């Protein structure tokens, strides 16, 4: 039985992180089921997998319990990435954010429990640290949430813990810190900062930084995140179960530094980019000023060893953006 090919359900599998996870685990010869409603994901992200006999696309919504049950029925593992991201989006529309991120999450937990899934690994968020001042952020110390989005991601952790203690479902939450890399969408009102800056610079537009640019972030390249998902899914360390882990590189850079690196790496393709000025705007509501993760817990309990610093990740990401977005 152990030799039988394992099946992974990846919710939000057509999104940025989800589609990268699909690609990785198809490469590892797993059966991969992708559940997505294409609210924020893209068919182009999974187009290359559609002819793969090990890949199944289920177009559905985690807000519908029946869709969740259908998607999870043959799964050994769930990697739950489906969510409505973005702090500003949650401030503008807290109801939809809650429906997807809380009710949808609960539906997935119930479906996973009822299908006897071995393990449920889910995307948590560094926004859960809220107004906690301490750096680096350690998993056991959080503050008050600063946005509806942060509340929903904290509620996910509470629900996961209850499903572990009450129903015996193995859960692991991964608190993502500012993930970036290939397939990340640069367009739209809620685009992440790195692809947004990249596309602006490629178009010879000045990137707009919220505030003075001295806010700092623990920018985390996508391959580090894939490593964490795989470790969390496969670990046999009982101490690692039913808890949460920071998923980050463990270093911080200011937004000003980030733009400097982007200009440097992009100017290798287009020298004029080096001279583009930066514009500073207002601070963004609900933003945490500084973010830096302690990754000691993940190193100790999961054997996590992130390979890509911000600079190493940006070099690879910039090349991908230049080839795919020009």
Image (cartoon, helix red, strand yellow):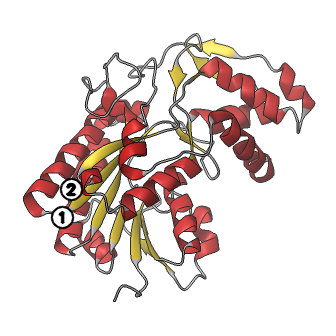
Which x, y percent locates residue 232? 38, 56
Q: Nearer the viewer, residue 36 or 21?
A: 21
Q: Residue at left 85%, top 24%? A: 274
The total number of labels drawn is 2
> Furthest residue to the left?
166
Q: Quadrant of residue 241?
A: bottom left
In front: 111, or 294? 294
**SS at mark 1?**
helix
Q: Is residue 319 left or right of residue 117?
A: right
Label 1 CA crowd tier, 10 Å (few <14, some 14–19, many 20+): some
User: Vertical placement of 147 versus 309: above or below?
Assistant: above
Q: Is residue 275 above or below residue 326?
A: above
Q: Residues within 10 Å of mark 2 (few under 14, many from 20)?
A: many
Which residue appears at 72% of the width and 32% of the height? 200
**Residue 284 place in picture, x, y as percent:** 47, 19
Please identify the quadrant where the N terminus is shown: bottom left
Q: Is residue 40 left or right of residue 119?
A: right
Q: Is residue 121 left or right of residue 216?
A: left
- Viewer can see residue 80: no
Mark 2: secondary structure:
helix
Q: Residue furthest right?
A: 271
Q: In the rendering, at what x and y percent does residue 111 appear?
A: 22, 68
Q: Residue at x 53, y 78 (%)?
A: 29
Q: Visible in this render: residue 114?
A: yes
The correct choice, above or below, for 171 with respect to 86 in the image is below
x then y, percent, for residue 320: 74, 50
State the CA–CA distance, disc 2 to disc 1: 6 Å
| Residue under label 1 | 110
Give residue 285's quadrant in the image: top left
Is there CB contact under 8 Å for labels 2 and 1? yes
Q: Residue at x 34, y 15 (%)?
A: 133
- Kindly identify which residue carries mark 2: 106
């Amino acid at each position: 039985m152990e030799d039988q090919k394992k099946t992974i359900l990846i919710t939000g599998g057509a999104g940025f992180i989800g589609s990268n996870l699909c690609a990785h685990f198809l490469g590892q010869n797993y059966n991969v089921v992708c559940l997505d409603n294409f609210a924020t994901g893209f068919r182009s992200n999974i187009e290359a997998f559609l002819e793969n006999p090990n890949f199944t696309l289920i177009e559905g919504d985690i807000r519908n319990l029946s869709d969740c049950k259908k998607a999870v029925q043959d799964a050994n593992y769930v990697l739950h990435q489906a969510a409505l991201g973005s702090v500003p989006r949650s401030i503008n529309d807290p109801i939809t954010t809650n429906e997807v991120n809380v009710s949808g999450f609960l539906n997935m937990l119930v479906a996973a429990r009822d299908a006897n899934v071995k393990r449920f690994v889910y995307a948590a968020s560094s926004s859960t640290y809220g107004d906690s001042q301490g750096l680096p952020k350690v998993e056991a110390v959080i503050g008050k949430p600063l946005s509806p989005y942060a509340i929903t991601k904290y509620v996910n952790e509470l629900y996961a813990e209850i499903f572990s203690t009450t129903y015996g479902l193995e859960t692991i939450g991964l608190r993502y810190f500012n993930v970036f890399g290939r397939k990340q969408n640069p367009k739209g009102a809620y685009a992440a900062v790195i692809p947004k800056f990249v596309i602006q610079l490629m178009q010879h537009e000045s990137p707009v930084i919220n505030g003075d640019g001295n806010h700092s972030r623990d920018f985390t390249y996508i391959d580090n995140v894939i490593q964490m998902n795989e470790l969390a899914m496969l670990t046999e360390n009982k101490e690692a179960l039913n808890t949460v882990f920071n998923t980050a590189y463990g270093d911080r850079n200011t937004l000003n530094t980030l733009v400097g690196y982007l200009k440097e790496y992009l100017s290798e393709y287009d020298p004029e980019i080096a001279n583009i000025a930066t514009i500073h705007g207002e601070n963004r509501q609900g933003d945490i000023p500084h973010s830096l993760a302690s990754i000691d817990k993940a190193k100790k309990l999961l054997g996590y060893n992130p390979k890509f610093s911000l600079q190493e990740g940006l070099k690879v990401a910039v090349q991908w953006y230049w080839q795919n977005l020009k």
